Amino acid sequence: MKLPKVMLGSNPFHAVSYRSTQERKEFRRRFSTVESIYKVMERSAEIGIKGFHSYAKDMEIRAIIKMREKLGDSMTVVSILPDIYGAMSRQAGAGSQDKNLAKIKMLFKNMPALMSAGMTGNLSPMVDSILKAELGFVKETKPSFVLLHGTLADIACVTEQRKLLLLFKERVLDAGAVPGLTTHNLGTTYRKLKEMNIHFPVIEAPFNPQGFMMQPSVEACLKVRREAGDVHFIGKKILAGGSGDPRKGLLYAYREAGVQCTVIGIGSISEADETFDVAKEILGEEFSYEYDIEAS
Amino acid sequence: MQEKVRIAIAGMGEMGMVRAVIAKGLSTYDLVCVIDPRGTFARLAGKQLGVSHYSSYEKAASAKEFDALIISTPLVSHYDLGMQAVRDGKHVFCEKPLAGDSTRAIQMHREAKKQGVCTQVGYNWRFHVTFRRAKEILENGILGELKYARLMVYKSEVTKPEEKSEKKNREERFGFYGALAVHGLDLLLWYAGKPSSLSAETTRVFSSELSDLISAVCRFDKGIHGLIDLGWSHHGFVEKDELSIYLTGTVGSMSVNPDCIEMYLEKACGDFPSGDSITYASEIPYHTEFWFTHRGLSHEMEAFAHAVLHSAKASPSWYDGYLVDRLVDALEKSGKSRTTISPVIEESE
């Protein structure tokens, strides 16, 4: 599987902003159609971006499928799973507006797994059911990499859910993709993975000059990066939640932290031009480099 | 010296699970057991967390040794469980609001003081980067002498008539106060000090016991005055709650919310420039052994562990919890009677 050096993130597409309510509202308004998301993806691809991150959200998925029609196999999709709320809503039937009805339907569909979890304390059947459904949902985008969502990865690691992490790996490999995880606690998560003797070939974590979300400390994250020679790191939060300068952020990620790849959420076509042009300037020929990683 | 706080967590709902995950992620905690009268919840949580589970505090306390208890149960049980645990000599962290009743809250504070244990209440926004930085700005006199404070807390949680059971459930959870408003009131007290008098207007749009929309003119000690503006029946706050405080001093003003601090200073002071400036939350350093959500929960639990391990005073303490409960009592009483309440807080620590 090919893991590109620079990738397009998707936070703005689902209205995530670390700056203000106004920006969240603006993103929600701006990215209210598949076409609006597609345009940013298309411009990024014109600049030379081949990697696209995607949460299991309907509009993002449809935009990626459209992008796939244009780029074919030259594009890499990195999917982040599961989107728990989205999964519940889909199980309850798309378009269902009644919250209570949706909950009842979701509970009914998961009843055997829920009963098993409640009686035995074993979450595996329920997690398996959600994973299978979510992998089925993103199948059409043909993801090369499937990363476990940061919050769930962090919970699973500190509570030492070895079985669930192995189950995730197995299901992703079965789907023909490379498993990985995202984390907001690189220092702690990586240590726990080592203790549980679990290896993920790809780990996505925050790296930025401000140290934003680099937990437990900047030094600890850099140490993990240096020591984990068998992991490909994707740097996220490069622009420190939108308050950092792209040049400084990219220089820090590639030169100081030494991550192999970065992912950057882009909120407009002009932002794509500005940010990815800087990345091209910094990386030169490396900009279009892709790492080969086996799905095994 | 003891390096870890041996802890039990009562209540395995959403907050209890969050507390448990953070406790597992912080090296200053040793999670000993979980407690929940609902067998399924207790069993599931115990199994996933790899600890023993019990159906009651009494059973847990007789079977396991632990130094501290986290109370993440529904509000109605905070008083009994809190009193029992401090009488057993346990240090106790209790979710907000402390008791939902100022008479009971002050009793809890007095009992904890008598037993000499460490107590904290879950006003976690004090540990969020922007609100904490705002406190430092005030303490360093960057705004000059504080003269005015305005609190705004809006949600869109109750914007249509509800079923009777839904209504009852919300009232038991202390209405809007329990949902978010108490966090804002705690921040206001933290910044502006104790209120000496207040005159409130309250409206029950859909609720029957507690108010949906609350506004009040307040006078605080030290010559500060201000406004309290709370409501969960405002429209258009579905995706993001509003929690903000505006503060004016003799040489500058600032507005603080979870995303940023906007400031205006008449002249430069330290690192702060004259005129307008904005500091985003992401620009303020925040490091913790295990980060979980943006609400300052990890630092809050680190602070409690530090207080227990170093026999220090925890903050916000149960007395701070009492102050918030007392302020809510005064707001409701003033709104109902249409009178000015003075004094608002009779008890001192």
Image: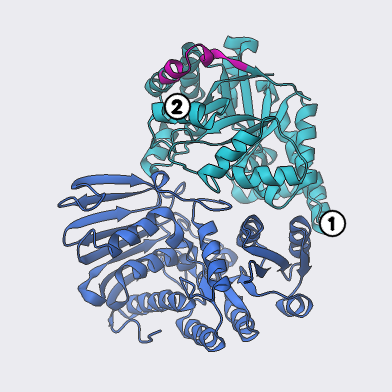
Chain colours: A cyan, B blue
Can residue A264 be seen by looking at this rendering?
no
Image position of A150 (left or right of A207): right
Provide residue B296's location: percent of width, then percent of height.
49, 56
Q: Which residue is mark 1?
A: A120
Host chain of mark 2 = A
Which tag, 2 or 1, sits closer to the chain's start? 1
Image position of A258 (left or right of B54): left
Q: Amino acid at mark 1?
A: Thr
Prevalent SS, magenta region: helix
Marker disc for residue A251? 2
Q: Quadrant of residue B173?
A: bottom right
Q: A239 above or below B50? A: above
What residue sits 51% from the left and 15% below the top?
A287
Provide residue B123's location: percent of width, then percent of height.
47, 66
Marker disc for residue A262? none
Residue farthest to the bottom? B114
Secondary element under disc 2, as helix, strand or loop, is helix
Q: Nearer the viewer, residue A68 or B348?
A: B348
